[in-house]
Amino acid sequence: MTPGSGQLTGSGGTQIVTITCTPGSLAPDTYTGYVTFNLGTTSAVVNISFTVTASGSAAVLSASPVAMSFGDVVGQALAAPQSVTLSNTGALSGTWAASISYTSGNNWMVLLPTTDTLAAGASEAVTVTMNDSSLAIGTYTATITFTAGSSSIQVAVTLIINAIAVSSLAQMTQSDMAAQYAYILSTVVGQQLSILANIYYGGATNNQVIYGELDALFPFETMSSLHVMKSINDVTAFLNAYAYVAQVLSDKPIVYYRLGEASGIYAYDISGRKMTGTISNTGGVIAGVTQGQIGALPSSSDTAYLFDGATGNISLPAGVNTANWSALTVECWIKLSNITFSQTAFVVANDDPSSTNLGFMIGVKKNAVVFRIGKGSAFYEINQAYTFAAGTWYHLVGVFAGTSLKAYVNGNQIATTSVASAVVAQTTNVVNIASKPGVTTNNFPGTLDEPALYNTALSAARVQTHYLGRLSGTSQTSYATLIVADGPVCYYRMNETSGTVAHDATANHFDAALSGSSLSYSVAGVLSTDTAIGFGSNDSLIFPSTLVLANYAGYSLEYWINITSGWQHIVITVDSTGNTLYYLNGAPYSSGSGDSVVVDIDLYYTGSFSAGSLDEIAVYPYVLSASQVANHFQVGSLGV
């Protein structure tokens, strides 16, 4: 107070007194006091109210960690709860509230507490508990948002539900066997097993058949080869090994050949029609075909045939007749021995419609897929460029649906063309596998497995189910878990539901910018448990300027893209010398005219296309190996 004393002169005299309040170390609050002025025997009191407010902003929230992962197993105890530490780094206390946004699944997480008041500088733990007993196997994601006034912070949560990891070899009890018997019959494998048991053994509930290997159901096997299942491990291996077979059989093929014979000149049909094929031979000695090759199905010990590309083939009986079919599907797993051959290599065919307007064929060139149907007066054709790699398995499918032709590779449609309403024209040739009927100039050079022929048009969903069936049992690891394990410097799940930020799922927080007016959120992603973002022709994803790839001795960009014909997996790697490698769908890639996907060399822009969706974008601070790329593609193709 200034001055602290003074003198008033005469009646009505005045003097100004300045009162100054300084907060010093006072906490934000309202303080009261008074000043007493004395003059002789009189006094006057002035009441003072002093409010101290904090400098800076109000409550500011931060959270640690900003990403959480839980792993549960179907039918077992829930994962242990985890905690998020919520802190108020602002200068004022604030009341916060939490909300949960589920990208996949609903109500599988519980927070405690869901709201509270945090003093300035204080922290508290929020417990995150799983509530997922009703969820199926898969990967689920959600976002917790904590909000206090204008301040908010998000925590990403990933929950992975795995199947039971069977490790016990203990012999099953009678009750165990009964439970496993019911479990097997509830699966697609069990359904087909019952049908086959009825066909070959006259009883769909024959326990010895159910607990025997599926091989033993086929006519070329003997009862002595039955292997009775004694443990749950046996059951698991059994279901994994025959998941693909069961999916094919459930679509009722006209013929289906496993090509698992180790000797002899016959290829046996397991469709139930017993249309036995004859392998090329001279006097009963196989010519041009090598049996017992490693097959296309990783979970099965079943083998495949290697064809020499010169004389080797399989001729099917005349009873396999496609005349007047109004729909047709042909599928086969192929692995080329080389990509230097010059012919159109026929995979399955009963004619060459381009020459005769009769029958059907599906085959490959070293850089294309060919599928033809003859209707008598004309033929229709798909001749779609495709880059193959030698020594790599591909799932090849052609579908004729009466008014259209479609070609698929690895579960994805690569081409389609319209057909004037037609049926398959009669031909006098029998169906051949690995050759063009009547000549050897178009023989297939490589390994074939699991060829099947249907008189129906498989849907795109069924084609993809068959493709994914190959991988059944190979891994319980989710795609996201696999990617994180390989150490990306940033990883964008693309599961945002709004906004202009693609959040980095790693701890590096290299959040990317989403730019454009045509962005669409929550579109179907490559993984069934997650979503993607759709981009228009002028939309983009821009990496942050703090992500400097030149700082790394080598680096890789990986993403999934869906333009029009299904999801494609793209990887670009650059080593320390600047050497750039490209991969498409798990295999080495080189650009060719007519490619359905053109890989963009610009690593700072993930795609140049008229419209499409992007998903699961990852950048690595090193060069991914070819085996890593192939593994990412295979696991991603499982869709979980």
Image (cartoon, rainbow, N blue to C red):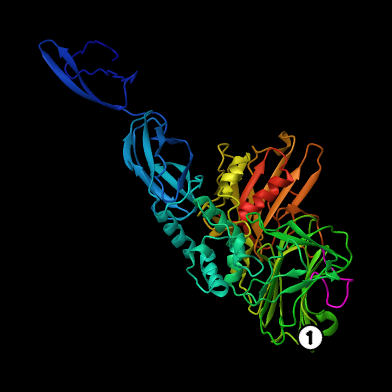
Q: Residues within 10 Å of mark 1 (few under 14, many from 20)?
A: many
Task: Choose top left, top right, bottom left or bottom right for residue 447.
Answer: bottom right
List x then y, in percent, for residue 217: 59, 67
> Left or right: where does residue 587 sit relative to residue 618?
right
Q: What residue is shown with label 1?
A: 427
Q: Is residue 71 visible?
A: yes
**Who's the residue at 42% across and 52% down the image?**
173
Tell me where the magenta segment starts and ends, as one range: 433-445
Front position in the image: 375 or 146 = 375
| Magenta stretch contains residue 441 | yes
> Left or right: where does residue 581 sit relative to residue 566?
right
Badge 1 amino acid = Thr
| Magenta stretch contains residue 479 | no
Front position in the image: 1 or 139 = 139
Q: Secondary structure at mark 1?
A: loop
Residue 165 position (above or below residue 84): below
Front position in the image: 39 or 478 = 478
